[in-house]
Structure formats: structure tokens, C-alpha cells
Image (cartoon, helix red, strand yellow):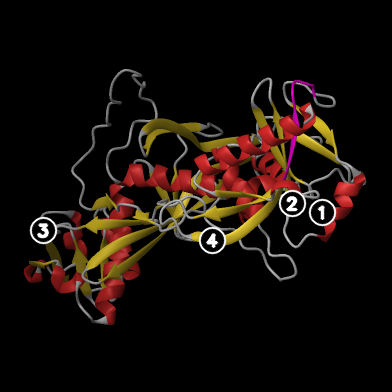
Amino acid sequence: MTDNQLNGELGETVVKATVLGLGHVFDGRGRLETGVDGTIEFRDPQTGKMTGKMVAVQVKTTANSLYTAESDAGFEYLMKMADVDYWRQTSLPVVIVLYRQSDQSLFWKSVAASVPGEERRLIFDKAADRFDAAAMDRLAAVAVEKGRLGVFIPPMRTGEPAHLNLMRIGMPDEIFVADSPFASGRDAVPALLRADGHYFDWVIRGRRFVSFRDPRGTALEAIIDVETVEAVDTELIADSDDHDDEIVMIELLRRTMAEQFAHELHYSSKGRIFYFKAEDRHQARRYHYRSLREVTSAMVVQVYPYKKGKRVGQIHSVRHHGFSPRFERIGSEWFLSISPTFAFTEDGFRPHRFASDLLSGKKRKDRNGSIRGQFFLFRFLLSGAELSSASTLDLFGEPEAEARAPSVLMFEAIEPVVMDAAVPESAWATSDPNAKKMKAEAEDGPVQMEMPR
């Protein structure tokens, strides 16, 4: 019995114990192995059900030797050509697990992940390729059914929360209706402006005025018949099955929301989006908010100068965090759907001439994390607990909320839905050859173009 035989058996035992400890099954082949020491079959950790998805495993053990070109970051491993030829014929995908007895280290790699043009050479990353609990999703991603179209990645984690991009809308109990001499809001606006009116949280449709604001005693009397003003239960219009009432409600919610958050957000009628206001020309703006549990911040107005050409240093564009609102009635309740997006201006105020091109370039780089972060940002703002962008954060206490007038509409966050299975995003990001490039592009800012003088 040689030392190599003992070390080999020890390595297989350590790998088996590790796999079992992580809630999956390692089945060794014993003395009859000829290039594959065993298989790992993945098991649903919540139900205990076996998935039938497997990878073949070859364990390589060393006592204390350094690997080729080993550093603190990684090393190389050269496979035997006879093993590579054998693994190509297997009906299961094959991974190699390296065990070093001296430091109890375990690393793994798919044998198909060899260096292009050097099919025997594997490059190991000591951080990413450690054989532990974090590796299970990536190992499961290797469990491809050979000979069939498509790839099946079994979920290794369960109970992941899914955040809906909806907020429940709370409305006042009463709504004010009145007759109007004007057929539409567009016709009524000039008369309101002549009366020095500056409230636009109302709707006129079919000569009927509707608003959460009592028009009596205000400049709104210029566009209504004051004698016909009546306060009615909000649900008479909000819960109506009449199509016109639904249109009125959607427009009234949008206008009331624009008025309520006018100190923070601008509404673009052309783009039909809300976006953060700039505090001054060519000036960036940071907004502090609470994302799930922690206080964080985002640059909600970002200034981008030209990076090359004759106009280096001049302002190319200003990007604003924004969202597209959609008001929907589900059952007897109204909800706001938040779809994060961006607005682009020349200086923080004037719409950019090439806004659609800049937005298209930015959208191509958006990933789940950035979209989720934007949603949490706007959810925090709309819920009425936002922080002043100029406030100082107290690391040992709660941030001070900005004082504001009573809200007409209340926006309530919806509890996340717990899914039966989780998406192994880390496994996909690691296996995607374009992941690093996509991440680097996302950090560069919007695509820039040379504009005509």
C-alpha cells in the first residue's frame, strides 16, 4: 500500500464528507475506477428530493506540494492527455477536485474549462473555485444533459424573495366633483392661469371636474361652477366599472402624484416619466435612502463631460434617475407599477437632443442589481420616509426625515413573495464569458456621441 494510494483514498473521503455535509450525495466507484472516482447527485435541500442531475468527479490529492505557478490569487493545473481523452467520451460532464492535505484546501474546475488551444491546462482562481457551499450552484450549472438540446440548472437554494415592482395606493375617503364650463383640462388651463392658479392636481373630462382638492375658495373656482361642487365617496369613482371613470382615476392619480412630489421629481409629459430634479445647472446630486435594511445613497443626477475630441471637459449630458409610472386597479385596490429608467438633459433642465440614443445605450448595460436598486430608491421616496439629499447621516442613529406637508396619496410597499426556488445568478455570472466585459461597460456611464456644433 503506497503513500499515493493512501493519499488518493483520503482525498476521496474528504470530498465525499464535504459533499454530504452540503446536503448532496457523493457515490464513489471504488477500486474499479478508471478516470472517474465517483459522481455527485444534487438534492433539493428543502424537500430532500433527489434531482437526478449528476456530475462525474475525479479527485486529485497531494500531500503538501505547491501547484504550478501558484500565488495567493491562483494557480495552474496540467491534466493528463489520457484522462482528457477518456473524459470526452463520458455521458456525464466531468469536474476535477484538487485536495491538498497540508492546508486542507479543496478546489474544483470543470475539465471542459481548459485554456483555449491548450486542452490540458486549467487555470484556478483561489477565490472563485473553492470547493465549498458557494460552489454548489456553479457545480449544478455543469450538470448538463449531454446529447440533448438545452441546459437544465437545478435550483440549489430555496426561499428566495421576489420583490414586486408595485406599491399599494392609499387615497382620501372623499373626492370632489363639479360641473365645468370647459370640455377638457386643456381648455381650462388658460382661465386658471389668468386667475393665478398653480394647482394642476385635477381632471376635467366631459365637462366634469374631479379632484382630491376642495376647489372652493381657491383659484380653481375660475374653471368650475362653484354651486355644483360636491364631496362624494372616493370609491364611487375609484371602484366604478365605467371606462371613463377609470381613465379619470388614472389621470387624477398621476397629476396628484406629480403635485405631491414636485419638490423632488419632474414629470416629463413627452417621455411620460418621473425623474429627479437637478438642483442647479451642471450640478450632480446625491440622494440618501434606505435599501431594505441599510442606509445607502445613489447619484440620482450625474454629470458626464466629453472624454475625447475637441470638446474634452465640456458637458456632454446629464443623466437623471427616473421611472415610468403605471396605475392599475387590481380588484378593489389601486397600485402603482414602477419601471426604472433614466432621463437625459443638456444641463440638468433642458431635454437632451439625443436622449433616446443615450437611453438606449444605458438600457443595454442595465443589470438586475441596478434596476432593483433604483426600484428600492423610488419605493423609499414615495413611501414618504425619504431623507434630504443634503442631510448628514448619523452612523449611530436614525437619519432625520425631511419635514413635508401632509400627503394626499399614500404609497405602501408590498411584502416580497417567497419563491419555491432561487435563481443561481452567481453561477450564471461566473459561466458567462461576457460577464466581466458587461460589468466594465456598466461602470463607464452612458454611451457618448459627438454632437454637431
Return the residue at label 4: 51
Q: Look at the numbered discs 4 and 1 and tell me whether their residues touch, using CB distance below 8 Å.
A: no
Query: Residue at horizontal 26%, vertical 64%?
Result: 334
Q: Look at the numbered discs 4 and 3 and tell me whether their residues touch, using CB distance below 8 Å.
A: no
Task: Please give left or right for residue 427 compared with residue 71 in the image.
Answer: left
Q: In the rendered image, which quarter is residue 16 located in?
A: top right
Task: Please give left or right for residue 110 compared with residue 176 in the image.
Answer: right
* Residue 448 makes an appearance in the image: no
Label 4 vs label 3, nearer the camera: 4
Secondary structure under the numbered disc 1 in the rendered image? helix
Q: Earlier in the sequence, mark 3 or mark 2?
A: 2
Return the residue at label 1: 87
Residue type at the position of mark 4: Thr
Per the model, the C-alpha gap separating discs 4 and 3 is: 68 Å
Q: Position of residue 319 (x, y in %)?
A: 56, 43
Q: Position of residue 34 (x, y in %)?
A: 80, 50
Q: Look at the numbered discs 2 and 1 and tell me whether their residues touch, using CB distance below 8 Å.
A: yes
Residue type at the position of mark 3: Arg
* Residue 400 part of the magenta-drawn span: no
Return the residue at label 2: 94
Q: Look at the numbered discs 3 and 2 and tell me whether their residues touch, using CB distance below 8 Å.
A: no
Bounds of the magenta segment: 58-66
Q: Position of residue 108 (x, y in %)?
A: 70, 39
Query: Residue at horizontal 83%, vertical 45%?
Result: 114
